[in-house]
């Protein structure tokens, strides 16, 4: 089984620019002018261009809204240095939402992207792999 990550965004070009700069991934290809593939993380990331206000869920009807929103599913990126990753993401336009959270041998910082989605950088004090 392989995990891929799909992220709805209102426009591809600024989303590609943000995610490549913030996460250090690369834009591999664009499919059908509305899907961008990003590689360089342990999972492939797809940016899906979906207009604001379009139907995201059929029952109950929920429209896409790119203001900051919360969901119980988000992605964490394991990095060797949370502070260096945070600086890169902030320079790209991410908004830091928490300070360092240290918990059971890990350090985590939470962010939101310019499209309302949350993500975290996390580093472990153990011998985690980062590729």
Image (cartoon, helix red, strand yellow):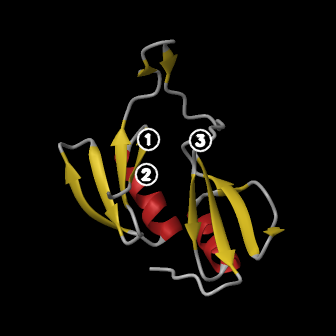
Q: CA distance from mark 3 to mark 1?
A: 9 Å
Which residue matches tag 2? 15
Q: CA distance from mark 2 to mark 1?
A: 7 Å
Does label 2 or label 1 sit earlier along the sequence? 1
Q: Nearer the viewer, residue 123 or 37?
A: 123
Q: How would you rate the neighbour count of disc 1 (Cα within 10 Å): few for under 14, some for 14-19, many for 20 or more?
A: many
Rendered location of residue 7, percent (x, y): 43, 45
Residue at image coords 61%, 74%: 85
Say what secondary structure mark 1 lies in.
Answer: strand
Q: Quadrant of residue 67?
A: top right
- With 30 as the anchor, is 80 left or right in this view? right
The quarter of the rendered structure image containing the C terminus is bottom left
Does label 3 or label 1 sit earlier along the sequence? 1
Point out the residue furthest to the left here.
32
Q: How would you rate the neighbour count of disc 2 (Cα within 10 Å): few for under 14, some for 14-19, many for 20 or more?
A: many
Which residue matches tag 1? 9
Point out the residue furthest to the bottom here.
127
Residue at image coords 45%, 21%: 57
Does label 3 or label 2 sit earlier along the sequence? 2
Q: Quadrant of residue 86?
A: bottom right
Q: Are marks 3 and 2 in contact (CB under 8 Å)?
A: no
- With 1 as the anchor, is 123 left or right in this view? right
Q: Are marks 2 and 1 in contact (CB under 8 Å)?
A: yes
Say what secondary structure mark 2 lies in.
Answer: helix
Q: Nearer the viewer, residue 35 or 44?
A: 44
Which residue matches tag 3? 116
Say what secondary structure mark 3 lies in.
Answer: loop
Residue at image coords 55%, 34%: 66
Rendered location of residue 74, percent (x, y): 57, 48
């Amino acid at each position: 089984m392989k995990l891929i990550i799909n992220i709805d965004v209102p426009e591809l070009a600024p989303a590609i620019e943000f995610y490549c700069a913030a996460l250090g991934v690369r834009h591999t290809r664009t499919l059908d002018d509305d899907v961008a593939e990003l590689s360089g993380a342990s999972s492939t990331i797809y940016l899906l261009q979906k207009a604001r206000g379009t139907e995201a869920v059929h029952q109950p009807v929920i429209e896409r809204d790119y203001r900051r929103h919360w969901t119980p599913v988000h992605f964490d990126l394991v990095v060797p240095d949370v502070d260096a990753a945070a600086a890169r993401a902030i320079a790209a336009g991410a908004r830091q939402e928490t300070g360092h959270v240290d918990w059971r041998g890990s350090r985590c910082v939470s962010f939101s992207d310019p499209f309302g989605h949350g993500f975290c950088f996390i580093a472990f004090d153990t011998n985690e792999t980062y590729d």
